[in-house]
Image (tube, grey):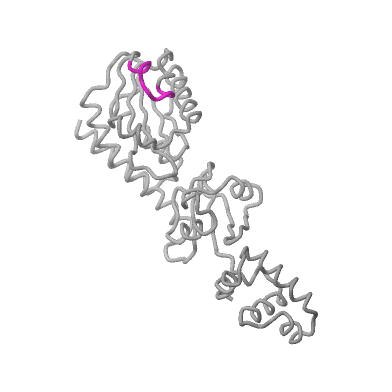
């Protein structure tokens, strides 16, 4: 059994370096199923599900599990994670029926699933949980030995998922290229990014904590491959099943016309509307309009904010 485990781990790390993320997750799940002789399973990573290969009765079971996961949008749920051991085996229909988690409870009447074992990522990020869910269609229980093997494998699997994403990112942007790039999945979750991306995202969408794009930005990227916000601009291309998003800060000067920039700079130095108008040969009314446009375009509401923003000019 130790030899089988070692071989599975070696194959997993090799695949992490060589395979694109979607294929790697399929390979990882197949290795987990083979390790403890399961009929199938599902791997849920940041709200995206991968299922093991197969057909017939196991295929119906996989489809049911994935459907329930997606409907529930399984999240880290700290109370659930802290109260549920990982691995967590359910070896009887009564255990399904009495389970506190609704999507697990729903499986008690599914004739294609007899036994289930779950491994969750208690320390998963705000973007969502990572789950490995395996099942058997027979009445053969998951043993303590099965649980121990899967626990050790899952610990290494989570590391290999991160390694795989690092390799995927490096294939999109070579190391040292000096660009702010993120791999965004179909749900808008940022699965991996370089260090500069989170700072840019926090400036634009602080409530999302730098782990996801809002639906409006995701829709724009899917439709036009670009998005322009208040403080960042994003260009996207499809790579390895992801949106490879290149992000850059929008400099305030690019938002204003040359005459607006001149008016703002003079105003920030303490000049009055009349003095600015005299210097540029326009009316004070024109200067007031230029400053009002600048305030609106820059999203500021006071002279102090204006001075701070134009310090980048």
Q: Main secondary structure of the magenta part?
A: helix
Say which quarter of the image contains residue 255: bottom right
* Residue segment shown in magenta: 95-104
Q: Quadrant of the C terminus?
A: bottom right
Foreground of the two, 298 or 159: 298
Q: Is residue 25 above or below residue 67?
A: below
Split into 4 quadrants, where in the image is the N terminus?
top left
Closer-to-camera residue (172/220): 220
Q: Is residue 102 magenta?
A: yes
The residue lying at 59 percent from left, 65 percent from top is 250
What percent of the width, then of the height, locates residue 14? 33, 45
Q: Is residue 195 left or right of residue 277?
A: left
Could you tell me residue 310's position as x and y percent? 59, 74
| Quadrant hosting residue 155 | top left
Is 248 or 290 nearer to us in this picture?
290
State the image coordinates of residue 292 (x, y, percent, origin top left): 71, 68
Q: Is residue 138 above or below residue 169?
A: above
Q: How many marks?
A: 0
The structure residue drawn at horizontal position 28% and vertical position 27%, both measured from the top left corner, is: 36
Q: Where does the image place residue 176, in percent across and percent down from the top left?
A: 43, 66
4 over 38 or under it: above or below: below
The answer to if 30 sits in the magenta stretch is: no
Q: Judge by depth and name the residue closer to the eye, 271 or 142.
A: 271
Q: Residue drawn at (32%, 40%), measured in percent from left and top?
A: 157
Residue furthest to the bottom: 279
Indicate whether 292 appears above or below 31. Answer: below
The residue lying at 62 percent from left, 47 percent from top is: 216
């Amino acid at each position: 059994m130790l030899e089988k485990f070692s071989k599975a781990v070696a194959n997993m790390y090799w695949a992490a370096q060589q395979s694109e993320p979607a294929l790697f997750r399929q390979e990882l799940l197949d290795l987990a199923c083979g390790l403890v002789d399961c009929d199938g399973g599902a791997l849920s990573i940041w709200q995206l599900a991968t299922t093991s290969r197969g057909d017939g009765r196991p295929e119906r079971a996989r489809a049911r599990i994935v459907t329930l996961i997606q409907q529930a949008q399984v999240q880290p749920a700290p109370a659930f994670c802290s109260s549920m051991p990982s691995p967590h085996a359910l070896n009887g229909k009564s255990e399904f029926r009495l389970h506190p988690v609704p999507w697990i409870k729903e499986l008690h009447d599914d004739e294609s699933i007899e036994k289930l074992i779950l491994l969750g990522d208690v320390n998963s990020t705000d973007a969502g949980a990572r789950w490995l869910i395996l099942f058997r269609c027979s009445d053969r229980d998951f043993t303590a030995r099965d649980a121990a093997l899967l626990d050790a494998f899952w610990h290494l699997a989570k590391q290999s998922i991160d390694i795989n994403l690092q390799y995927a990112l490096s294939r999109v942007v070579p190391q040292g290229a000096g660009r702010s790039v993120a791999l965004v999945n179909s749900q808008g979750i940022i699965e991996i990014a370089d260090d500069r991306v989170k700072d840019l995202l926090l400036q634009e969408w602080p409530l999302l904590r730098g782990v996801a794009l809002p639906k409006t930005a995701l829709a724009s990227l899917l439709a036009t491959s670009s998005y322009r916000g208040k403080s960042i601009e994003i260009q996207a291309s499809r790579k390895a099943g992801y949106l490879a998003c290149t992000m850059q800060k929008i400099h305030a000067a690019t938002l204003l016309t040359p005459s607006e920039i001149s008016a703002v700079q003079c105003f920030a130095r303490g000049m009055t509307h009349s003095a600015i108008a005299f210097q540029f040969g326009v009316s004070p009314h024109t200067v007031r309009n230029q400053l009002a446009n600048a305030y609106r375009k820059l999203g500021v509401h006071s002279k102090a904010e204006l001075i701070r923003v134009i310090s980048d000019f």
